[in-house]
Image (cartoon, helix red, strand yellow):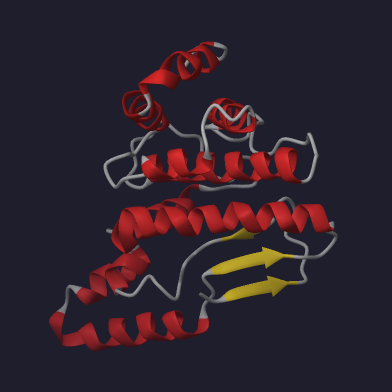
Amino acid sequence: MKLWCMNANLGTVGGGAPMMKHLITSRVLSGSGAVLSYLASLNWIFGISVVIAAAINVMGPDILLVTRNKTYEDLYAVTFHELSHASHFTSIGEWNYGKLIWYEMTHGNNEHLYGVGGTGTEGEGYCEVSETYAFSIENYVRSRVLDNQERMGQSSHYFFGDYVKVLSQLLIDRTLSPNEVFSCLTPDIQSMDSLLEGLCIRYPSKASAIESEMSKYAL
């Protein structure tokens, strides 16, 4: 796994997990409708697509950490955030993770880093699940390891913010463990509703606590 540390000011962005060393095929790198996917479908220039994909594969990072103006606690917590994305990659596979990356590349803006949600666009569901999971693990680490009560990913700028509140609290209260959440991150899980439902089914003794936390935000 290749990790880059960048001494740059990227605003609120603390890092990223594009998993470029592992997104092997050109179609995955681009998502289902992008230029490389189109090139790869044209046999006579398939080689160009392969060369571009190979170059990105060699040069690009799997995980990027932005270090400027960051405290030790910030870097520690954000590292767990990005590693959570990497673990999600191992669960859903390169093709589905490629959809997630393409969605984030094409739908984010200054106000809504991950788009506004509710569009039904391919990859949006994986984005919702992956970012909620990563922010929740980050908040768990901040609280349980660093004794820091700051919570990330819960503002209205994130269309999945209420889900981050729910999953973060379930982890911090130790109602759920990180391993239990990870066990449900299968390729068919493309929304937080389906993830929480899956957790209730897999761990029935915890269902009432999960549903109670969800009810606080009318989820």
Report x, y in % for residue 45.
21, 85
x then y, percent, for residue 76: 73, 57
103 vs 155: above or below: below
Q: Is residue 88 above or below residue 59?
A: above
* Residue at 54% across, 48% down: 108
Residue at (21, 83) in percent of width and height: 46
Residue 13 appearing in the image: no
Residue 162 picture location, percent across and down: 57, 25
Horizontal placement of 128 versus 8: left or right? left
Left or right: 168 as drawn, with respect to 92? right
**Residue reaching furthest front?**
205
Residue at horizontal 64%, vertical 32%? 172
Q: How many marks?
A: 0
What is the quadrant of residue 7 in the picture?
bottom right
Asked whether the viewer can see residue 80, the reply is: yes
- In percent of width and height, residue 98 lies at 36, 60
Q: Nearer the viewer, residue 214 or 39?
A: 214
